[in-house]
Amino acid sequence: MEKRRTHVLQWHPAFYADIQIELEAEAGLLIFENEHQLGTKPKEIDVLIVKKEQEVPVRKNIGRIFRKYNIVEYKSPTDYLSIDDFYKVYGYACFYKADTSREDSIKIQDITITFVCHRYPRSLIRHLKEERGYQITGVEDGIYYIIGDKIPIQMILTKELSEKHNLWLKSLTDDLEGADTVRRLIEQYGEHKENKLYKSVMNLIVRANQDKFKEVKTMCEALEELMKDEMDAKKAEGKMEGKTESVLDLLLDLGEVPEKLQAEIMGQKNPEILKQWIKYAARAETVEAFEQKIRKME
């Protein structure tokens, strides 16, 4: 079977939600910033996590290394963590430290770097050992500390993480391991289905692993039931957009449509009114005639 193309999947928004799930027990201690801007040029830290109280340790395994300012670089399952990626992010950490109004207001010892990737980056690890003299120490399933630098650095290999402790981050992949993982995801999603973070991650996981979910029919049905409200809302939204586009297409055949009228049409959410407007637009000889007609409905 041909492998699905996953390059169109938006992994980073799901990862931003996912890392908040992983740290949700201590979210009150942390501030999360997505695509934190570095200066005025287009340099972005994937995720910046700032501890509100520096002295309070983070107990979650992926956050035990955290200090005050924690820079996270994420690579999707189809991407690879290269040697240059390491130096780019290390440079971001240095730039973040220096990009302040007061000299040395961010201490170098208050910064950490976390690399999150799917595959073991052999070339990078060899480089760090041979060229930098670093030691790579596994502290837990999928979590490695890179020792030998002033800045604490860790590498998280999502494929090696424990499902028991890091189910959601481990499952942020296009290659779920099996039915048991699917079952656990559905069970946990059922407990948090109103949470937007879980919705964001689950939506991406399902799209990236459609075959795995379809293989287990009963689980797929359970997931559809859990996501029914969201799916129904998206269907309704799609139908609404289709009707507004139909009105605009018909009017554009008649001539230029004023911006104010376009905004009014796009903002109309009543399906019955839109249905009537389609009829008016189809019968109108001018845009002005259509507008006069809908004003009589008010």
Image (cartoon, rainbow, N blue to C red):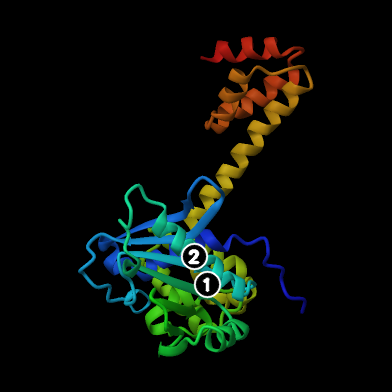
Q: How many marks?
A: 2
> On the image, numbered disc 1 is attached to which residue?
172
SS at badge 2: helix
Q: Earlier in the sequence, mark 2 or mark 1?
A: 2
- Residue ID at (58%, 48%): 235
Vertical side of 286 occupied by 158: above or below = below
The one nearer the camera, 23 or 228, is: 23
- Residue ID at (77%, 12%): 285
Q: Is residue 237 visible?
A: yes
Badge nearest the viewer, 2 or 1 = 2
Identify the mark at residue 2; answer none if there is no mark: none
Which residue type does callout 1 highlight? Leu
Vertical side of 234 occupied by 80: above or below = below
| Residue 283 point in image, percent of width and height | 74, 18
As measured in the structure, the alpha-carbon distance from the residue carrying label 2 to the one carrying label 1 is 7 Å
- Residue ID at (39%, 72%): 188
Which residue type does callout 2 highlight? Phe
Vertical side of 297 occupied by 12: above or below = below
> On the image, numbered disc 2 is attached to which residue?
15
SS at badge 1: loop
Q: Residues within 10 Å of mark 1 (few under 14, many from 20)?
A: many
Image quadrant for the N terminus? bottom right
Q: Residues within 10 Å of mark 2 (few under 14, many from 20)?
A: many
| Residue 216 point in image, percent of width and height | 57, 79
Q: Is residue 199 visible?
A: no
